[in-house]
Each structure stands twice: as structure tokens, then as C-alpha cells.
Image (cartoon, grey):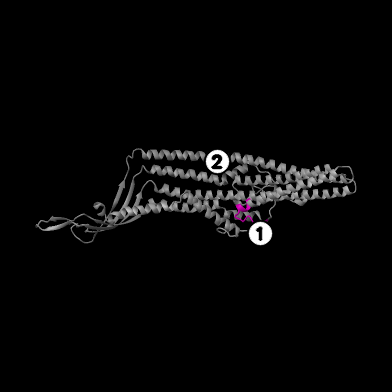
Amino acid sequence: MHAMKTIGWPARAPALALALALAAGCRSVPDAARMGEIRAEAAEARVAAMEEGRTVEDRGEKLQGKLSLEQAVGRGLKFNLALQRETLEREVAAGRIEASMQNALPGVVASGGYTRLDDELWRTDGDGNRVRGRFADRYSAGVRAVQPLFNGHVLAAVRAARLYREWAEARIRDAEDEVRSAVAEAYYGAVLTGHLLEVQVAALETAERQLSEEQARRKQGMASHYDVLRATVEVSNFKALVLRAQNEKDRAHTDLFRLIGASPESEVELTDPLPLVKERVGFPDALRTALARRADLAVAEYAVRMQREAVRNAVGDYFPSVELFAAQDWGNPDPHDSSRDDWGDEWSAGVQFTWTLFDGLGRRGALRQQRAELRKLELVLEDAEENVVSEIRQLVLSLETAEEFAESQSRNLETAKEALRLVEVGLREGENSQVEVMDARQALTTASANYYQSIFDHALVRLRLQRAMGTLSDGPLPDKPVLGEGDHQTTHDNFENNL
């Protein structure tokens, strides 16, 4: 007990400080239960913000009025979170360039210190006098500057940092193209669902008109009760299809609003129609454009070049290092006379040379790793180019097929419209039955839906070909040829003219 009482506050202070530090560290790390509470609070705040119409960082704006494809893409580039994250690579690149200058610019280090020795030392001089040879209290301060003159890392590090900046810019361009592609695809998808809804609404209106006519014919004794029931069932079926089409339209618009950072409650009119651009895209021209302009290929190319600098940096470990240095020091006792209890100073300057002659195969192993990584990245680039060749070839063929299919569906739509007209005339003249009219109407509805779907598919292939060629940075081209030149003909969808 007595031994424990002799332990005073100075002895207990380090232990208490350590305990407090550990407690603070544990307190700052939430466990699973606390993390659940944190996420629940975040969920409540997010839902409340949405219910009150508030936004987070100006995102979630409720849009009204007309919305063009260009406006939608512009909003997507502004509010897409993945793209915002990618653009931070610019700041990372700027930091890497600054850090790469470390081995080329001078370094200045200031130092200072105080040392308490256990005891002073005394000595006897030549006259037999006792003089102090070491002081218990020692103070020091100094400044040291070092200027590298030569080493094997400076140029490789600077080049690698600048390549990283270009690599980051290529990554950003690729991310921007991805946003443009996703927004344009969602925009066209929303336009398509609007037309499909119109097709079903038009079919429902026709079915309701037919039901009214059958009910009138029933009163006149010209139609049976079965005819009326059949027309009633058809109206009910088309109502279900209208509800389904409305749900698909709402979902497509919600997907578009999410991509462009708009509120799901937005109400917009999509002004750009589905284009049908008839053109012939040559495979060599498309491939040449893709290999020259695709951002992901530039990313792979920059990665190879950065790795080459990493190899040069590893080779630099075999070279000596030469530095120029200068130092100014102050101390008490005087650096020139350790028996003098006063501040003094001294300076030094020179050149220092270091060269590692053997490091246990560390440099050799590191160089071997970097060369292997370089070969891997070269194969990645080669594989990416091969994939581009295959992708462009497939999309060029798909574009031709999509155009032919759209033209065939256009002709099929005209045929279906004419067939319905003829059976409706035949029904009034007693030559055709109600069942034949219903079949013709269903055929027209299917043909109309296929027509718009074919135009959408064609526009989607063009969009993907534009993305594959790396030309989306010029903006989506709804009514211009993919390669920007050559003969082409543009046709826009027109519901009134096609139904």
C-alpha cells in the first residue's frame, strides 16, 4: 500500500493521457448500431427535403416547360455525381505535378532542440583550475538547405506527373461521353414511351367509338349481344394497355430526371423527336475516327506512357545522387567552444555524393516488376484497340440493319392503315364483320408500336456508334450524319401522319 501511495501525478500522467486518447479514438468510431442510427437520421433528412421541395446542393430542381436533348445533356454534365467525382482528378494531377518537383528544387529544413543532461561535467585545466566541461542544459537551432544536382528520378517524375494530368483529362472526357450517351438514350427512351402511349390511347379511342357504333347497331337489330360484349371487352383490354403504357412513360421520365439532376415531380415537354437519319457509314472511316478520338484509348495510351516513366524511375535507382548543401547552426554552449556558456554559431557547406552499390537485389526486383507492369498495360491497350475494331464493325452493320427495319416498318404501317380503312368500309357495307375490324385495328396498333420502336432502335444504334467513335464530345447529333459529312436524309417521327 505504501508503494502505491508514493506514485504521484507526474508518474500517472502518461498512463492517463494514453487512456484518454484510446477512449477518444473508440468514441469517434461508430459501431454497427450507431451507424444504423446515423443512416436513419440521413434518411429522414433526405425524405423531408424531398417532401418539402428542398434540394441538396441545388440538385433536384423541379423542371417545367420544354426540354430539348441539348438541355438535358447539359444538365447531366452539370449534376452527374460520378462525373463530379472524376473531375477531382484534375486537382490530384495538379498536386502530383507539384510533388514531382521535390527532387529538382532545393529543400530547406529548420531544426531546433533542447536537451537536459543528467549532470554537468568538470575538468581541470593546465593551471590546475576546475572548469566546466559539459553543461546540463543544451540548446540548438539550425537551418539546412539542400539543392539536388543530379539523380536518376527528377525527369521521370516530372514527365510522369504531366502524363497523369493528361490521363486525368482523358478520363474526364470519357466520363463526359458516358453521361452524354446515358442522357441521350434516356431522352429517346422517354420520347418512345410517349409515342407508345399515344398509340394505345388512339387504339382505345377507336375501340370506344366502335363500341358506341355496335351499341347503336344493337338497338337497330343489326348487331348481336355478342358483338356488343366483344367490343366492350376490347375497350377494357385497351384501357389496361393504356395504363401500362402510362406507367412505362412515367418510369422513363423518372429515369431521365434522375440522370439530369431534376426532381421526379418535374413536368416537361420533350421537344426533340426521334430522328431517322438515312446514311451510309463506311467502316474504314468510322474505325479511323474511333481509333483517333476515343477517350478510353487515350486513357490506355497515357497509362502505358506513365508506366514507361515508372520503368525509367526504377532504372534511376542505379545512378548516383549528387547534392549541394549549406547549413547554419546556433547553439548554447557555443559550437566552437563547448566550455563557453553562451550562444554561438557556425556554418558549413559542401557537396555530398551517394551511390548505392548493392542493395540485396531490391532495385533489380523493382525494375523487373515495373517492366512486367508495362507489358501488361501494352497488352491492355492492344486489346482495347481490337475491341474497338469489333465494336465499330458490329455497329456499322447494325446501323444498316436498323435503317432497313425502320423503312420496312414504315411500309408495314401504311399497309395496316389501309387494311383498317378497307375493313371499316366493308363493315358499313355489310361485307366485313366486327371481328375483322378488331383484328385490323389490333394489327394497326402493333404496326404503329413497331414503327416507333424501329425508329428508336435506329436512333440508339446511331448514338452508340457516335459514342464508339468518340465523337459525342461534339454533342448528340439528332438530325445530322454520324461522320458529319456525306449525303443523308433525315426523317422525324410524326404521330398524326403515321396513324
Q: Which one is nearer the viewer's eye here, 148 or 66?
A: 66
Q: Position of residue 401 (x, y in %)?
A: 69, 40
Q: Position of residue 196 (x, y in %)?
A: 72, 48
Left or right: 80 with respect to 95? right
Q: Distance between the Cα atoms at labels 1 and 2?
A: 42 Å
**Label 2, on which residue?**
384
Give, as a single range, the part of the protein colored magenta.
255-268
Name which residue lies at 30% across and 54% down: 12
- Residue 266 quadrant: bottom right
Query: In what element is the residue under mark 2?
Result: helix
**Label 1, on which residue?**
64
Name which residue lies at 65% across and 53% down: 69
Name which residue lies at 48% across and 39% down: 376
Please tell me whether mark 1 or mark 2 is closer to you in this view.
1
Single out the residue that lies furthest toward the front.
1
Q: Position of residue 24 (x, y in %)?
A: 40, 54
